[in-house]
Amino acid sequence: MDDDLPKEFDLIVIGTGFPESCVAAAASRVGKTVLHIDPNEYYGGSWASFNLDAYNALLNESNADNSKEIKNGKFEWHIPLEGEPAEDVANSEDAEKKPQWTAEKVLKQSRKFNLDLCPKILFSSGDLVQLLISSNICRYAEFRAIDRIFTQFEGKLLTVPCSRSDVFNTKDLSIVEKRLLMKFLTICLTYGEDKCEEDMSEFKGKTFIEYLREQKVTEKIYMCVMQAIAMTSEDTTFEEGMERTKKFLKSLGRYGNTPFIFPMYGCGEIPQCFCRLCAVFGGIYCLKRQISTVNVDDGAQRVSIEVDGQHKVQAKHIVCSTSNLPASLRSENPKNCLSRGIFIASSPLGNFELNSCGGGVSLLRLISADGKREAILVQLSHYSGTTPKELFTFHLTTSALSDNPQSDLEAFTQQIFTNSPESPNILYSSFFTISGFELKSNGSGLIQATAPPFYELDYDKSIQDARNIFSKLYADQEFLPRAPDPEEIVIEGEDPKALSEQQLPDDLKAQLREIEKFAEQMDIAEMNEDNKTEEAMES
């Protein structure tokens, strides 16, 4: 850390995960001085993306320090090393047609992978998309529309129709089922209106399943709605199920055929977008810096940190991910633990015809056999900017039950990675746990701890976590007001007209100068004519 770095800030943020970056950007945007520091040499924390080599190294390191958010990591290759024959392909008639993958060949393309530790799918009208637009942070990122939403029906993959054209073009539903589905979705879209409230008052306090059964939908429509549209469980209330369905429908048609989008090059780009905004408004960044101690002075209402054992910095508040806090301030109780699996395959879910679209992202929600647990599967191809050509990456996420993520995910891996014709050909598998910790009692409120990733499809809970922390620190300030575009920023003393002219191409600049010169000549001619008229009138 440089000696000329300021010794005092309004806010110190430790960790560059999504909620920490949100708070840092919001504070910097309203004029607070922010020091954003991270013990890691990369941005994102447990929300980051890695190439394959770096990801394997992270998994190897995850078992050395149990205080980190990423732990219980391991990986395994299901293809031979260079020079070893592949027994299942060597005697096949298609051996010459199919790529002969080895671990070395996959690792040579390591830099073409962007493997998310915490992948998320964004609703097109969800909280994060609205925040990105309202704050103007959207200019820092690119997105892809999700191609397909899958569900499972009678052991087979079923593509869920999202738009009206999908409903009437699909071959998976009969004519009667198409009409039933359209009628049901139309009713859900009007939920909350006065007339609809009267018609549905009898279902208040009941479950969403009871409402579906009353609508007498077929089993196939029932599965589409429960697993892929509303994404509900057997215990979900009628009100919550209707709100979830309505949220799905309101996101349709905004950026593609499905209601979801995915960030190009992986979800690790999202925290960095907020970090960029923080830096634009004066936030200072320091990576690979260890926090030695954190001291709270309740009397002076100040908090200080010691960095790398020698540099002391003070602030009015600290916002920190709990895994980066000293052990004295952190409880050992785990919080929001997730079991994660990342798989690399040479074939997609179903068949290549189902995965022919250009978005490169597909979604499947899985339910355990007993119906009590669920998992989210995200399939990515090279179109998403996260995977090399001819390979597919699968992300599997569920709530953790134990310290063995492979065991937690087994009920779901058996559903999709078995030896059925629709199963992907797995080349590589890996597992790890994402965990957080509770912050010990902090009555002064000078230290605020962010929550680790929640088990959710989008970023709604994490955004609310960031909003809550920001409101505690700066109750009278707006959370992430719109940032101006570069062309809207005028430095004091500059001519705004000249500033906008500089952004034009050279040929347009020349035309503009000619027009201005012509206007000048016209003005001079008019002035001369006016003078002649005045002289004539005087004479």
Image (tube, rainbow, N blue to C red):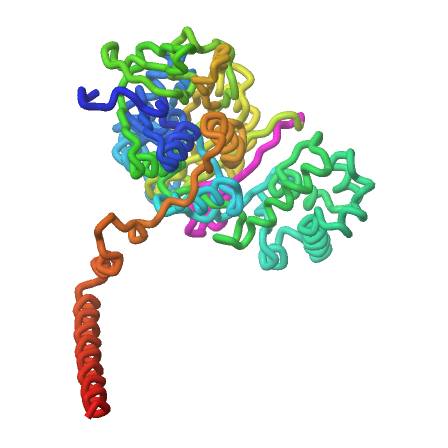
Where, by quadrant of the figure, is residue 367 drawn?
top right
Q: Is residue 67 visible?
A: yes
Q: Is residue 264 left or right of residue 256?
A: left
Q: How many marks?
A: 0
User: x and y percent of residue 302 in the render?
Assistant: 38, 15
User: x and y percent of residue 11 in the render?
Assistant: 36, 24
> In the displayed structure, would residue 275 be above or below residue 512?
above
Placement of the N terminus among the 4 image quadrants:
top left
Q: Is residue 47 left or right of residue 336?
A: left
Tell me the magenta residue range. 348-370
User: x and y percent of residue 169 in the render?
Assistant: 60, 58
Placement of the C terminus among the 4 image quadrants:
bottom left
> In the displayed structure, would residue 285 be above or below residue 156?
above
Q: Nearer the viewer, residue 22 or 520?
A: 520
Asked if residue 336 lies in the magenta stretch, the reply is: no
Q: Nearer the viewer, residue 466 or 243?
A: 466
Asked if residue 366 lies in the magenta stretch, the reply is: yes
User: x and y percent of residue 528 in the render?
Assistant: 18, 84
Residue pictured at 34% horizontal, 20% vertical: 315
Q: Is residue 462 visible?
A: no
Residue pictured at 64% horizontal, 44% vertical: 245
> In the displayed structure, would residue 77 be above or below residue 322?
below
Q: Nearer the viewer, residue 399 or 358?
A: 399
Residue pictured at 53% horizontal, 54% vertical: 253
State the residue lying farthest toward the top: 328
State the residue lying farthest toward the right: 202
Residue pictured at 50% horizontal, 13% vertical: 443
